[in-house]
Image: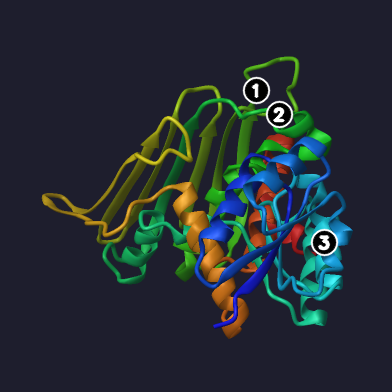
Amino acid sequence: MTDVCFGLIGYGLFGAHHARAIEDTAGARLGAIAVKSAASRERAAAAHPNATIVSDYRELLECGEIDVVDVVTPNQTHFEMASAALTAGKHLLLEKPMALSVDDCDQLLQLAEQRQRLVAVGHELRLSSLWGGVRRLIADGAIGDVRHALIELSRFPYRQGAEGWRYDAARVGNWILEEPVHFFDLARWYFTECGDPVSIYAKANSRDESRPELQDNFSCFLNFAGGEYAIVTQTLAAFGHHQTAKITGSKGAIWAHWSAPDARDSSPEFGLRYGLGDDVHTMAFDKPTGELLELADQIAAVADCVRTGAAPPCSGSDGRWSTLLCLAAEASAQQSGLVEIAQFLR
């Protein structure tokens, strides 16, 4: 089996995790890393001596051996780097959000179709034994038809990111695109049988009056055509990293939870129960769950998709949807009113 060669753009905190995951994945190889910071290039070279280290991502794209470009950079750079990678004929693994506008997402999808290249978006929660376990129970009919969901995150404030990009609205887009983007993807996935969402109503505010454009507290109703709805809510003004998903159906409910000091903690507390009334079951897990474990599974899945032509766990179309829902939620929060999804689909 020929190894799938990855080129990594970005070597910050999470980029370094991507690099290790690629090197640790059977059937994958880390061919090159592009990062503009001299200090980061030194760290990358020391940690990955078999990879070519360059300062300009365009130099990485000229490397003929690269099969997949993995983009792990600040949000505002995603479209530029992803479109360049696809134009160069590379497959693409793109960290969320896919882009900062629906039009940019559409252009990436058009490029991928023209070049016949794979686009995978980094919604790694789909690969989780826990959050994926929720979807399997729904698909198996364990709680009947889905009617309602509550997906919640309570966590410590965001880190600044390289050069403070995560606290700069021009570069991050908005904070809904940071982590709620994952929960919108889960909600669409969990409500697959209900069709696409039709409207959204959101509220948000900030604990810091000096940056009202970046909201620490965010909640929304995501509505579906049949009357089903999901509530997505997050606070960044807390401590630790605590996520829950409560899915209610016509025959019962699922409660899943994950808790640790940090999303990348290797020893979280997690679990899943489901049932109705006194008839309650506990799901047993044959593997742990956590962001870095799911990242490793994502790298392996993308490598396999490149070899086989299979669809990725989260496609470019899925990534477009999660971006679209974040932007619709932002518009709703700004307008303090209901937003119809159709207006973002024109």
**Up-down relation of residue 96 to residue 120 (above or below):** above
Q: Tag 3's secondary structure?
A: helix
Per the image, the residue denoted by label 2 is 214
- State yes or no: discs 1 and 2 in contact (Cβ < 8 Å): yes
Which of the 4 image quarters holds residue 338? Answer: top right
Query: What residue appears at the point 63 percent right and 56 percent down from the top-left corner?
Result: 322
Q: Earlier in the sequence, mark 1 or mark 3?
A: 3
With 191 as the anchor, is 174 left or right in this view?
Answer: right
Task: Tell me, yes or no, if residue 267 can be seen here.
Answer: yes
Taking the spot 62% from the left edge, 44% from the top edge, the residue there is 14
Q: Residue 37 at x, y = what percent? A: 81, 39
How far is mark 1 from mark 2, CA to CA?
6 Å
Amino acid identity at mark 3: Leu
Pair 1/3: label in front? 3
Horizontal side, residue 268 vs residue 14: left or right:
left
Question: Label 1 amino acid?
Answer: Ser
10 Å neighbourhood of mark 3: few (<14), some, or many (≥20)? Answer: many
Q: Secondary structure at mark 2?
A: loop
Residue position marked by numbered label 1 in the rendering:
206
Q: CA distance from mark 2 to mark 3?
A: 34 Å
Q: Quadrant of residue 190?
A: bottom left
Q: Residue at x 48, y 40 (%)?
A: 264
Asked if residue 338 can be seen in this view, the reply is no
Upstream in sequence: badge 2 or badge 3:
3
Q: CA distance from mark 1 to mark 3?
A: 40 Å
